[in-house]
Image (cartoon, rainbow, N blue to C red):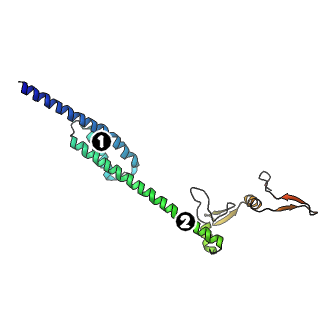
Amino acid sequence: MENEFAGFIEQHQEKEKTQKNINELKSSLLPKMDQLSDLYPDKVKPPTVRAVLDNAKRLYNKSKVTNEELTNIISDLDNLINNKKEEQEKAKQEALKRAEEKAKQEEENLKKVRAGKLDNSELKRLANLALAPDTHKNLFRPDWASYNSNSGKWTLNTNLLAKTIADENLIRRVQEHGKDTGFLFYDDTLGN
């Protein structure tokens, strides 16, 4: 009788351990499902990701589930999460590399412009490029000129051009009788 009771107690403890392990696995399943869902926008989830998430939800809601089923689905979720994160990191590195290459190319073109080795058609092409998203400037286009791609025409901000000329060049002001009154400056408020 004692042996039967000891066996019953041992089986009961084993079931409790298994149930405790299943509950722990189930509790770790929800954060992984959320993490994977966050990596993919709702309308763009690939079929494999949707299938794994559906299977994980089914196992989470299932009353009788085995340790093996839960460990397999957690492993699948981890693999998908790691793959997506690696893909995102790779895309980030490629974007950085492209940005560095573009910056090097711009620097080379600027050197050519300063040395006068860039022909007019290439300079015009560079000036017509869109503004850089980070600085909102085009290094080959002055601030006082803007290009309208719809009409194909350039427009000139005369006030900004005058300010640029006055700021970059020291121009002496001389009155009618040859009296020097200082340097020319641009007055933003009056526009002259």
Q: Residue furthest right?
A: 177
Q: Quadrant of the N terminus?
A: top left
Q: Quadrant of the C terminus?
A: bottom right
Does 44 sit above or below residue 138?
above
Q: Where, by quadrant of the figure, is residue 171 drawn?
A: bottom right
Q: Measuring from the top left, give residue 52's x and y in whole percent.
A: 29, 48
Q: Measuring from the top left, give residue 177's x and y in whole percent.
A: 94, 63
Q: Residue furthest left?
A: 1
Q: Amino acid at mark 1?
A: Lys
At 28% from the left edge and 36% from the top edge, which residue is drawn?
A: 24
Q: Residue furthest top?
A: 1
Q: Measuring from the top left, give residue 184's x and y in whole percent.
A: 82, 59
At 27% from the left edge and 45% from the top edge, which residue is drawn?
A: 73
Residue 22 lies left or right of residue 160; in this view the side is left
The residue singled out by tag 2 in the image is 104
Does 181 sit above or below residue 119?
above
The residue singled out by tag 1 in the image is 57
The kind of secondary structure element at disc 2 is helix
Does 30 sit above or below residue 12?
below
Residue 41 lies left or right of residue 147; in this view the side is left
Does 83 sit above or below residue 33?
below
The kind of secondary structure element at disc 1 is helix
Residue 90 lies left or right of residue 117; in this view the side is left
Give how far apart the Cα atoms at labels 2 and 1 are. 49 Å
Q: In the rendered structure, which disc, 2 or 1, sits on the residue that comes first in sequence? A: 1
Q: Measuring from the top left, give residue 147's x and y in whole percent.
A: 64, 63
Q: Amino acid at mark 2?
A: Lys
**Closer to us: 151 or 139:** 139
